[in-house]
Image: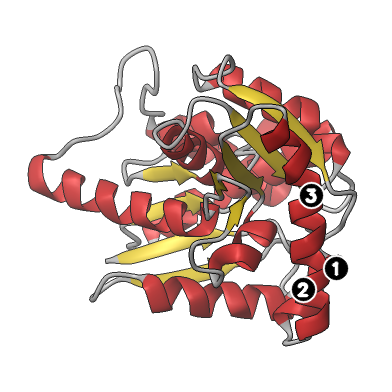
Amino acid sequence: MRIFWQSFVDRDIGASYLTALQNYLNDIAAPGTRVDVAGMVPPDRDFSRLSELRCGLQAIDAALAAEERGYDCFVMGHFQDPCLYDVRSAVRIPVVGTGEATLLAASQLGRRIGLVSIDPAFEIMHYEQADLYGIGHRVKFVKGLGLTPEDFNEAFAGDAEKKVALLKGFTDCALPMVQGGADVIVPAGVLPGLLIGGEKGFMVANAPVVNCAAVALKSAEMWVQLNALSGLEPNRGPSFGYANERSRNDFRTLMAHGQNALRSN
């Protein structure tokens, strides 16, 4: 099984993180599973709706390319899942959104979910996500840490003190949520998810903390297996109708050459 994992972090700027992520995912993968992590240029660096859309469009293009290269599954390795439904309608291989998979998994572990995001700019987006996935009434708290991907680099490069400081900051952010009634905590980002990935049994007070990186990978493995067993795939009617060849070609032309190329066709 080959899984393509699309991160929204720059391969050079976030080198220590992407290396740690690829090593971690392949360490916990089932026998016979290979995970290839790809970065993005430019990365998601401005934390805005426009940046999310641009990165989402690049992810669609990457998913189409991954399918052509024979990958068995595409993972949107960015918790906000921009253009997730569009990716799902563009390819026939299973598509897993880290945010979607993690929120649905968290809803099985507790009734009231608290999300710790990287930056406050994402707070409203996460509430909208929860509404989109049908569990808006379960997500009671969202709080941003006010960090950037670069803030995690030293920890993933092996700086133990930096890791301890980040874990403390995460706990300090999540604790008021638990005190206010949250009974499960979700790191709303693969960066903080990977940070707690090596902390077995990590909790904030009595609330379990869900490792979104592990959940996304195991969801990907599950959907590949289910697809192989019975051909199970998303609804191809009104929900995720499969884009025809011309639609896919038009999109890839736009991404590769811009709007003028479409006009010439």
Q: Quadrant of residue 39?
A: bottom right
Mark 3 or mark 2, earlier in chain: 3
x 52%, y 19%: residue: 135
| Mark 3 element type | loop
Is 256 situated above or below 121?
Answer: below
Residue for badge 1: 150
| Mark 2 element type | helix
Distance between mark 2 and mark 1 Cα atoms: 16 Å
Residue 164 tag number: 2
Tell me, yes or no, if residue 258 can be seen here.
Answer: no
**Residue 42 place in picture, x, y as percent:** 80, 59
Mark 2 or mark 1, earlier in chain: 1
Mark 2 or 1, closer to the camera: 2
Dot 1, how many residues are within 10 Å of its Cα: few (below 14), some (14-19), or many (20+)? Answer: some
Quadrant assignment for the C terminus: top right
Does residue 247 appear left or right of residue 262 in this picture? left
Residue for badge 3: 118
